[in-house]
Amino acid sequence: MMLWSLIKILLFVAVVAALTFGAGYVMEHGPDIVIAIGGYKEVQLGALQAVLLGLALLAALYVAFKLIGLLFAFLKFLLGDETALTRYFNRNRERRGYRALSDALMALSEGEARLAIANASKAEKLLQNPAITKVITADAAEMMGDRKKAEETYKLLLADPKTRFVGIRGIMKQKLEDGQTDTALALAQKANALKPKNEEVQDILLKLQADKHDWKGARKTLTSKLRAGSMPRDLHRRRDAVLAVSEAKDIIDAGNSIEAREAAIEANKLSPDLIPASIMAAHAYIEAGKPRNAARVLKKTWEMSPHPELAVAFAEIVPDESPKARLKRFGELAKIRPEDPETRMLLAELNISAEDFPAARRALGDLPTSKPTARVLSIMAAIERGEGGDDAIVRGWLAKAVTAPRGPQWVCEKCQHVEPTWVPICHNCGGFDTLSWRELSRDELAMPTGTDMLPLVVGAQAAAAAPSEEAAEDPEQTPAPESEVLDAEPKK
């Protein structure tokens, strides 16, 4: 075979050299070519005739090569090689098949789905190897929206162990699109068993298990991602803690307090900065009669991320203490991050409960001007009211609170949806572990603009003093009574 390939290469070089020589001859002696045959007869050819003759010679050489190849294969057959002729014809068919396969891949990458299917079908007939051609056919059918043909092709791929994963993955994604999550979960488990290191399948399986509250299964999948190297170790610990917290919540709902206590403490150890895990661990320690452990857990999380729910849990350690005693005990928590806005608002609220309004004002400091959130302004309204301030001033603070930013909230980093409480899975986009405690930017806020709601909050007198555009245009708009505003409790 190598000798025959060398002969063909040499003949090709000879043909190119002859054509080069012929072109040089024509340039030197003119367009006419004279061919002498044995010195007895001369034939004069024009340029067009010479080109046609050259093409005919090339065609003759091509046919001659084919015949010589066939002759060699026949001689081998006569010498006892029973598969020589079969191999000769198979090589030709394979060349055409791989050419069709290449055309199918090119058509698929160019978005020509129908052409890709046609070339894939041709390649399948020539190569008699349906694995790769059926994969191309399925992708092309998905591209052109023919889901029925794609599903039929995926089912054919299930029969071959080499392509079974592709078939399962394709049907799984179709079931996900159709909302058949139970079937998709079963298929994801099969696909993960075939290829445990496939990152896409791992992510789909993890999300489906979390949606079904299969927290143990989800934690196993998360561990598989870590072992496969598709997840950093610190992220694995964080998300494992999220799953542990979710599992603990379900255990609490089932009434198994001892197991829930252990799960909550484990979750906190995995990720001390996870606020829900810290709160659940603190509750577990309180139930176990270990208030110091509960305080230690909450202080550690407060140091990393102050949060109002942590303060609520800290208060539950000693639920029946007086306002002054609580203020004194909370001093341990406040000195950890004294300049944090959450600490300052907490101290202001505690001083309001203790009826020490000047101290509450001092604790709040410049927050009403530097970070005027709804909570800060509501606290200022409570301070003014506690100090006996004018009702108009109280109403003014409440009016500002209506349109002020809400402050930090549980915001999904994926879709910017705001959740009222922390959840492992965003209710809007289904993102897993996407909530963070932060303040929405002005561009992300979806709140009343200007002072549209002012008459509903501050009453008729303040509405007259600071009317909104809509209120000015609508004289029939009815404000809320002043007494409802003045009796409102400040946000804690």
Image (spheres, rainbow, N blue to C red):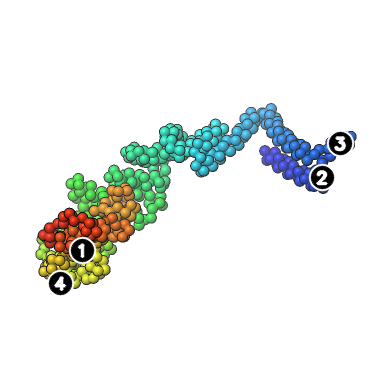
Q: Are marks 4 and 1 in contact (CB under 8 Å)?
A: no
Q: Are marks 2 and 4 in contact (CB under 8 Å)?
A: no
Q: Are marks 2 and 3 in contact (CB under 8 Å)?
A: no
Residue at point 19%, 72% (across, down): 362
Q: For mark 1, give the secondary structure.
A: loop
Q: Which residue, given by chain and number where applicable, does mark 4 sit on?
A: 358
Q: Which residue, given by chain and number where applicable, does mark 3 sit on?
A: 42
Q: Amino acid at mark 1?
A: Ala
Q: Which residue, given by chain and number where applicable, does mark 2 sit on?
A: 30
- The mark that comes first in sequence, 1 or 2, is 2
Quadrant of res 300: bottom left
Q: Amino acid at mark 4?
A: Pro
Q: Are marks 3 and 1 in contact (CB under 8 Å)?
A: no
Query: Residue 66's x, y, as percent?
Result: 69, 33
For label 2, count other residues whose C-alpha is less than 10 Å away and answer few (under 14), some (14-19) or many (20+): few
How far apart marks 3 and 1 lie (CA) works out to 113 Å
Quarter of the rendering occupied by the C terminus: bottom left
Q: Please tell me whether mark 1 or mark 2 is closer to you in this view.
A: 1
- The mark that comes first in sequence, 2 or 3, is 2
Q: Please tell me whether mark 2 or mark 3 is closer to you in this view.
A: 2
Between 233 and 153, which is closer to the camera in this rendering?
153
Residue at point 57%, 32% (across, down): 126
